[in-house]
Structures are given as C-alpha cells and as structure tokens.
Image: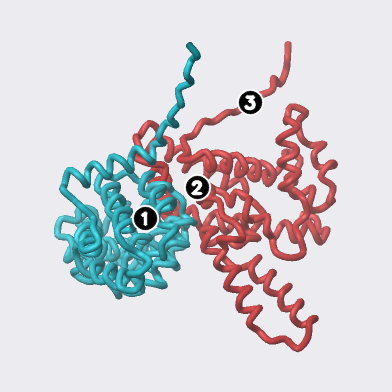
Chain colours: A red, B cyan
Amino acid sequence: MVKDNPRVRTKSFWVPTEVAGERVFWMSLEHSLNRPSKKGPSLAEIVWSTGDVEDAFLALPPIVPARIRRDAQRLLRPWPDGRYTDAYWRSGGILNVFTPPWGEQEDEVWAAMLAEWQATAFADENARQEALRALEQRWNHTPHPFFAGLTPAQVMVGGGPQEADLADEFLYHLTQMHDGKPFASVGESLIQTLMLLRGWSCQPRADGRTPLGLIIAERDDLLARRERALRGEAE
Amino acid sequence: MAKRKRKKSRPSSPYQRNVRQADEALDRQGIEIQEDNWQALVLEWYAPKEPERSMMARYIAKHEHELGVDWAREVLRMEVYFQVGDYEQIIEHHKRAFSRYPRCALVEMWVAEQVFRQAGDFWCARSMYHYVIEHLPEHPKPYYEMGFMGYLLGDFTGALDWFNQAAERATEAHGEIAARVFYNRGITRYLLEGDRKAVIADMQEALRYKRDYAQAKQVLRDMRDRREMR
C-alpha cells in the first residue's frame, strides 16, 4: 500500500488579461515562499537568516519543477542597498496584480524626488551622493500611489498566508462575477475587475478590519520578521 | 505565348479599409473639404459645442499654417470612427495620421479615453492626460479621468485630489462629465472618510447635472437608508 500519495491542489480563476495571469502566478509563488513550513520558518525566512538559497531549497519537495525553483531563486535574491527597483516587476500581491505593468519610466514619484534632488545645491559631491542614498531609502519606504498605497519594501517582501487566503477569496469572487461575461474590450474587463477589487478591498469584515488593512499589517509583520532574521535573532 | 506575370496587388490593411469606409461615409453626407471650409467643418463636426468649440478654434488659430484640408480630413475621419465606436481604429488613426501635425490637446483628450478605457493602456493614457492638463487646464475631463485612474490604481487620496480639481472646473456645460465627477468623488470620499453627509451632497450635485443618473440615485437611497454601499 502506498502511503502519503503526493497531492496536487489546482485552482482555476478568471483573470482579465494574460499579463494579470502571469502576475497571479508570481503572487502565488511569493505567498508560498512566505508560508511557514511544518517545522517553523518559511523558505524566505530561512534565506533571510542564512543567506543561502540552496540550503533553503533542500526543504522543497523534489517534485517542484526547475523553472519554479529558478523563479523562486529570483524572488529570494538579496535586496539591494539602494532603491528596491525589483518592486517594479514583483506582483505587489492581490492589490496590484491587475495593474498594467509599469516601471521607472512611469514612476512619477521617483521622477519628482529625483528632480528635487537635482535642483538642490549641495556642499560637495559626497553630500550630493549621501542625499541620493537617503532619497532612495525614502522611496523604498514611502507608500506609492501606483502600488495601491504599499511601499516598495512592502511589495518586495511579498504577501503572507493571510493575504494568500484573501487573494483566493477575491479571485473566486471575480471568477463568479466575470467568467463568461462578454466584454467589449480588454480595457473594459480590466476596469470592471479593478472596480470590483477596490470595493472589495475596503469592505470591512466582521471584526471591522478591511482586506486592505489586513494585507498591509501582514506585510509589515513580514518586514519586521525579515529585519529580525537579518539581525540573526531567533523567533 | 509567354505567360505574363500578373502583378499582385497588396491587400489593403484593416486600417486602410476603415479609412476608405470613413471617406465613403463622409461622401454620402455630401462633405467636401476645401480651402475655404476646412476650419468650419472641423468645428462643426468635431467640436460643435462649447467649451470644446472655443478650444479647437484657439488651436486652429495658433497652428493655421501647419494645418489645412488634409488635417481636417483626418479629423473628420476620426469623428466617423468615434461615431461608430471603433476604438482600435481611433487609436491607430491617431498614431498614424496625427503625428505629423502639432499635438492637439482636444483630440488627445478624447483619444486618451479610448486608450485608457478600451485598450486598457493606463500609462500611455496617463501621459496623454498630463499633456491635456498642461494645455487645457480649464477642462474638468482630464482631471476626472486621472481621478478615476487613481481610484483604479488604489490611490484613493490621489484620486480624491484629482476629483476635487475636476469639481472646481465642472459646470452645466460639461453635463455628463460634471455628473460623473461628483458621483465618483462621493464614492471615493466614502471609502476614504466614510462621511455620509459629504457623499449625499455629492450625489445630489451629480443628479443636478444628470437627472436620470441611476447609480447616483441608488447611492443616495443607500446612504439615506444607512445601508452599506456595495
């Protein structure tokens, strides 16, 4: 008799665009990396504390395909000292997966910060570079209007188990509402999706908290755990 | 007898076919664009009402020597595409036909709506709206569209700021847009502040501009019944 057959859990959701579909995949991977294992820490926490991705991957079942391992490795690489520009391509979680992709070229916040820095007179080159480094940190930790109010750091850390459940809840709701519905254009389906998302994200639950508030609180918690892991403090 | 090779004619693209159809539609209506009427035709067709009419007239006066009959034909074709609601052709036509003329904020304002709401290209539309705001600062529509985009991006504070700017510019002349400005401002205020009184005031203002605004009536009923807004 075979014990413990491998189980594969599959889900099928309607999404408005192909790009959104790809980002839902990235989002799920981010959730998986932040999900605590049976033994305790999540894969992300292991990497934060050891700095060793290969070591963390030993915890993965052998069935995980090479491509997923590569993508996970990309998500787990160390964060830069400067600006977290990887935030541009990360999923940003359920609050951001449907937002059409954007990058530095579209980033009005960074452009405004940079313009202010360029217009400032500094005592010397050292002071100028120091101000730029401070500016990059300010960008990393300032809620960004194009990330649905998350900071780039909150985007970088990814979502946790609670957000994973909320994302499933929303995607299920979205599928029920829109699957099979005829849309006149891709823009219309995208806008209808985002309107549904924004309304859902602000609807208070029984305890008075909104999905938006829960997601931000969990990402802040993950950031705090990351800080502790980087400092080598045990949980 | 030697076989004569027949020259294959290149099949026309959907874009070119649509251009021909637009020209046929204009012909059927007896439109003849000439040196002495191109300005009047553009105003009559593309911007028949104020305040757009004055905006277009200002643009034509400023760039008169760079425009002319050919430009007017492109504008009238564009209007045909708007009338049949062919958003792909509107966007394509704007790219192909208008790049050789000075940018016209009024044309961009209406094309940007298609880029945003039909093609779903938020970032291209956003950059067009920034241009429109710079050149038509008095029109509420680009502020309203930026507010709506902000709302969709989840930037409620930013959205409210844009809607406030749109509300400052909205008048009876803007009709439907003015109604939408107040409706959307009310919804955003509710999400941000939960201020029912402010929402009721905005819905009433929306209904002043559009009496049969079903969604505004529904929100107003919900607010008065103190039920949760969907």
Element carrying mark 1: helix
**CB under 8 Å between callouts 1 and 3?**
no
Numbered label attached to residue B111: 1
Give, as a three-letter code, the residue at label 2.
Phe
Camera-nearest residue between A35 and B187: B187
Element carrying mark 3: loop
Q: Which residue is mark 3?
A: A8
The quarter of the displayed image where residue B184 is located = bottom left
Q: Which residue is mark 2?
A: A98
Q: Are marks 1 and 2 on the same chain?
A: no
Residue B3: x, y in percent?
48, 15
The quarter of the displayed image where residue B43 is located = bottom left
Chain of the residue where label 2 is placed in the rendered structure: A
Identify the mark nearer the N-term, 2 or 3: 3
Element carrying mark 2: loop
Measured in 3D between alpha carbons, the distance from the residue under mark 2 to the one under mark 3, in whole angstroms, is: 26 Å
